[in-house]
Amino acid sequence: MAGEQQTSIVNVRVFDGVADALTAPTTVTVTGNLITGVGDHPAEGTVLDGGGRVLMPGLIDAHWHAMMAAVSLPVLATSDPGYLHLIAAKEAERTLLRGFTTVRDAGGPVFALKRAVDEGIVAGPRIYPSGAFISQTAGHGDFRSLLELPREPGAPLSMVERTGTSVIADGVDAVLRATREQLMRGASQIKVMAGGGVASSYDPIDVTQYTFAELAAAVEAAGHWGTYVMVHAYTPASVRQAVRAGVRCVEHGHLLDDETAALLAERDVWWSLQPFLDDEDAIPIPTPEGRAKQRLITDGTEAAYALARKHGVRLAWGTDTLFDARLAGRQGAQLAKLARWFTPAAALRMATSENAALLALSGPRDPYPAPLGVVRPGAYADLLLVDGDPLADLAVLADPANLAVIMKDGALVRNTLATPGSGG
């Protein structure tokens, strides 16, 4: 690491992503893009005085949609893809400035955005891309109108397929092809729609989607590349089939029963839950039918968290914000809602080291192989310096103004401290 830029952040109390308590005032040293010391004397280079603030890992949102978070559904369905990518790039910068240094993108055409972020062309979080949703006909990723049915051999793809938002694949061979295409494009994990959804018009929540053989085909193809399948599913039937097929992470699951939650724990399957409530942060759903499905889901949130705690299921946290720039701006406020069910320390672990453990399931497809979500030597230098104590009050993370310093990959994204000095 000789010759690399060094930064020492002194006089900080550290939440390391794991412990229940902050450290005593200490120093964290960054060399290049990695943390190289905790507790050492300041190294030669830039010195930032944290003034006794809390230093913690950058936040991780395990269920984000970079292409869909900040635009309404009508705009998403009718706009030029170039325009949508420009909006997504701007929202990626805002995401980073909210303290989210990493996101797992749970579906959408984000490969170009990820490349631009990684190359420093635009500012944004690290992105673990899933690529296009893989959906059966009449599944949660099938957004065609009824006028586009039946699909004729040789007919052009629908708009959502042409833009890389969804792949409609029926049968084992088609699912294998769709999975391999996303891996070819650079997916770090695969997203399959295994049950009914809220934002889609033609699939009731109770519908189980795909056959066991189709789901198992996606799991096998992903496994050959050393990675895993995550599934959208809410109901016991859809989740049980997906778990039997070998998926490693269930997204949502707000309607699960005791038996199915126990199965997740037994099979060591991750449960990526979102704090969906029927409140000011509910995703805007324009139709009465969609709103009825949404209320069914929000009514199940309390029971879902209770079941996860009862059975000790490995929990991840994400927002799944869609179709509203104002809601996207409340990413930190959604994290703060976890105080309803968890201690601040448990919630922060979920949004840092535990979410990072989920991302690491990508194995050799992991685009960022150094540790994330922790403050320790060898980890990526993705760090937040916070005004206030998030271990005492999660709400301080709801307001990005409380982030005095944001560092991603060793570079200062925001620094509101006094002009740094020179150590040595």
Image (cartoon, rainbow, N blue to C red):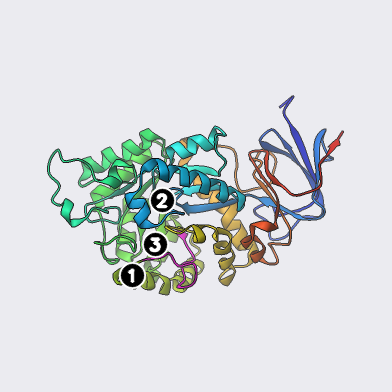
Amino acid type, label 1: Lys
For the N terminus, the quadrant is top right
**Looking at the image, is mark 2 or mark 1 nearer the viewer?**
1
Which residue, given by chain and number where applicable, does mark 2 sit on? 248
Element type where label 3 sits in the image: helix
Which residue, given by chain and number where applicable, does mark 3 sit on? 263
**Looking at the image, is mark 3 or mark 2 nearer the viewer?**
2
Most frequent secondary structure within the magenta stretch: loop
x and y percent of residue 253 in the render?
39, 63
Q: Is residue 277 magenta?
A: yes
Q: Which residues are magenta?
A: 272-285
Q: CA distance from mark 3 to mark 2?
A: 12 Å
Relative to 300, residue 18 above or below: above
Element type where label 2 sits in the image: loop
Q: CA distance from mark 1 to mark 3?
A: 25 Å
In the displayed structure image, the side of residue 350 where residue 3 appears, left or right: right
Label 3 environment density (alpha carbons within 10 Å; few <14, some 14–19, many ≥20)? some
Q: Residue at x 64, y 61 (%)?
A: 399
Amino acid type, label 2: Arg
Q: Is residue 167 visible?
A: no
Q: Is residue 233 magenta?
A: no
Element type where label 1 sits in the image: helix
Q: Residue 297: which quarter of the image?
A: bottom left
Task: Give the total number of marks visible in the rendering.
Answer: 3
Which residue, given by chain and number where applicable, does mark 1 sit on? 293
Outermost residue on the top side: it is 2
For the C terminus, the quadrant is top right
- Residue contact at pointers 1 and 3, CB within 8 angstroms: no
Please tell me which residue lies in front, 36 or 245: 36
Relative to 34, residue 4 above or below: above
Q: Residue at x 48, y 43 (%)?
A: 128
